[in-house]
Amino acid sequence: MNWDDLRIFLAVSRAGSLSGAARALRITQPTVGRRLKALEGGLGAVLFDRLPDGMVLTAAGEDLLPLADSMEATALAVDRRQAGFAQDVRGNVRLSIWESFAPFVTDHWPALQTRLPDIDLELSVTHVHADLSRREADLLIRECLPKNPSLIARKVGRYAYAVYGSRDFVAANPAARGEARYDSCAWVGFDEDHAYFLNQAWLLERLGGGLPRLRVNNALVLQDAVGKGCGLGVLPCFSADGDPRLQRLSEPLPEIARDLFLVVHRDVRRSPAVRAVMDALIDIFEQCAGRLVGGQDIEIEQEKRNHIVAAI
């Protein structure tokens, strides 16, 4: 029995098609079809009915599915734990993060390189949570706590938003400095697919049913558009305060301030390289606590700084 053929079987069962399985596995569709046929030949059973609307498991396929799932779970567990067998602080660590925080991490990369000379850092920039159980990433930085009991999280900070505009835009639109800005000024915001973002929801409430004149699907593009004078925007302070094109027009908005958590799988945390990156990131967020909340004077008590949701 070839485990790779069972991976093909699982991918087809989840995708419901050869093409979907090929995309998930990043191989060609003919390869998927050939390997599935080889598996069926080896078992002497047809695993899928090929129907016009997709691939449907046969009775034999249904019998095989939980066994293949169990083999996959074991293989993934071995993959996660093998990183912990190493003794040296070296290797590749993958961090999943959304686009606003990617520049925050790269700002500190020179210091990280000095502190972690034998570690390569890979940034996976996405809005979608990576599956740590499947090693889609080693670490996550996210706003919400994980529900999976195999994952553990530590609060590493809190960050705030404020209203910003370009200096030229504000000079040309005096109303931008006051509450009349919501009725009188053009705004830049997110598109409909990202209306659930807190800064977007906060803005939509104040626009009274209207929409930003320019809508984007990327936070870095949003900040760039505001910086180029396309309109006002609600931006994270840690990013916008350092942009020389921008002027802050409000105090940090406490109602949309958010906590940040560093998340890791229980198995992967045993890796010396992952542990070293975690410690370095925790130190960076502590050092930048004031910047993250917009430069406010904040008290960082020891128990808050070391707030552990689940012991790491």
Image (spheres, rainbow, N blue to C red):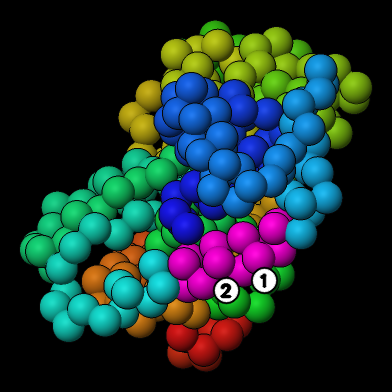
Q: Report the span colored magenta.
A: 64-77
Left or right, residue 270 beside residue 248: left
Q: Main secondary structure of the magenta part?
A: helix
* Residue 36 in magenta stretch: no
| Residue 294 on image: x %, y % | 49, 53
- Find the residue positioned furthest to the right: 209
2 over 139 or under it: above or below = above
Asked whether 275 or 13 is in front, the reply is 13
Q: Secondary structure at mark 2?
A: strand
Q: Is residue 247 visible?
A: no
Q: Measure how far apart labels 2 and 1 are at the Cα level.
A: 6 Å
- Residue bearing the label numbered 1: 148
- Find the residue positioned furthest to the front: 44
Few, some or many C-alpha atoms within 10 Å of disc 1 (few <14, some 14-19, many ≥20)?
A: few
Q: Amino acid at mark 1?
A: Asn
Q: Secondary structure at mark 1?
A: loop
Q: Are marks 2 and 1 in contact (CB under 8 Å)?
A: yes
Tell me which residue sits at (30%, 49%) in the image.
Answer: 122
Tell me which residue sits at (78%, 32%) in the image.
Answer: 49
**Res 309 → quadrant:** bottom right
Tell me which residue sits at (60%, 43%) in the image.
Answer: 40
Q: Amino acid at mark 2?
A: Leu
68 over 253 or under it: above or below = below
- Residue bearing the label numbered 2: 151
